[in-house]
Amino acid sequence: MKYIISNSGVVNAIADGQAYTFDKNHHNYNALIRHLKSGNVEHFEAAYDVASSVEHFCDGYVHVKHGTLNWNGIPMPELFSDRIMQMRKEGFEFEPMLNFLNNLNDNPSDKAIVELFDFMQHKHLPITDDGHFLAYKAVKENFKDIYSGSLDNSVGETVSVDRSSVDSNRDRGCSHGLHVGSIDYVTSYGGIDLDNKGGDDDDGGGNQIVICKVNPRDVVSVPQCSQFQKLRCCQYEVAAIFDDVFDKSVEMFGNKTDNVRVVKYNEAWKEDVRVRLERLSAVLSNQTVGA
């Protein structure tokens, strides 16, 4: 490969007969420079284009067709395509999404998964390196839940109920189950002003926000009444006290990017995911399938 790097960092390169130009604004700038210097054409080409880099990482079972990611020939729902592309732009590898898919595949309800897609379209809801996702919850000053005042939401607590006790009907807005929400929903529900990170509950005390870590497996329903901004589940872990809204697609909780948990998924698992995605595509297309 031949290349020239200007004093301002603009790079003009030729790799495998193809001309490339990029600057420091490219999301993979440092990796591109590294691959140029090492002469690794394949890695350079993959890092230059986000879509190609996804295909390269996934050994061909995820590929791009007409701007949409496909898993072994099945179009992936928009949530996955958008989130994966954003992850790559931010420099994250594909493992967090593989782990998310693995956990998602353990959810017994196709309908709940499709409803989760509606919820996660909202901003500031990252996935974690182990394939869970983070959401917000308004609680009392003493960390008890606002509705009943009986559930302890202190950091480190795992709150759970039997899945069968959680209402799976999204047409019922206020009903049984554990709830988490988007940042807009919980600030409204808790009467919380983000400028001072406090608010008033019915007793005049200050409410606050905690960060909840939810396994996609435990999602039951997403009510329509709040524009899909709250979610009912059967379990969550209270991971942290709210400090600021998340601005990345993946949250490492202080871990380095290269410490992402790597799981080697076999061909049978990949086929299970393909079958599940096919069913989800049917649900999204309003076809009748078993949940």
Image: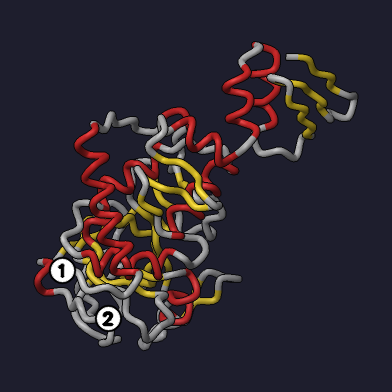
Please report the residue visible at 22 percent of the width from the left and 56 percent of the height from the top.
217
* Badge 1 density bin: few <14, some 14–19, many ≥20, Cα 10 Å: few
| In-image side of 105 versus 201 (left or right) | left
Frontmost residue, 278 versus 178: 278
* Badge 2 density bin: few <14, some 14–19, many ≥20, Cα 10 Å: many
Q: Is residue 132 above or below residue 203?
A: above
- Judged from this view, the residue extending furthest toward the top is 38
Disc 2 is placed on an element classified as loop
Q: Earlier in the sequence, mark 1 or mark 2?
A: 2
| In-image side of 119 versus 24 (left or right) | left
Please report the residue visible at 29 percent of the width from the left and 59 percent of the height from the top.
154
Q: Is residue 27 above or below residue 74?
A: above
Residue type at tag 2? Arg
Residue type at tag 1? Gly
User: In the rendered image, which quarter contains the N terminus?
Assistant: top right
Q: Which residue is mark 1?
A: 290
Find residue 170 and name its label: 2
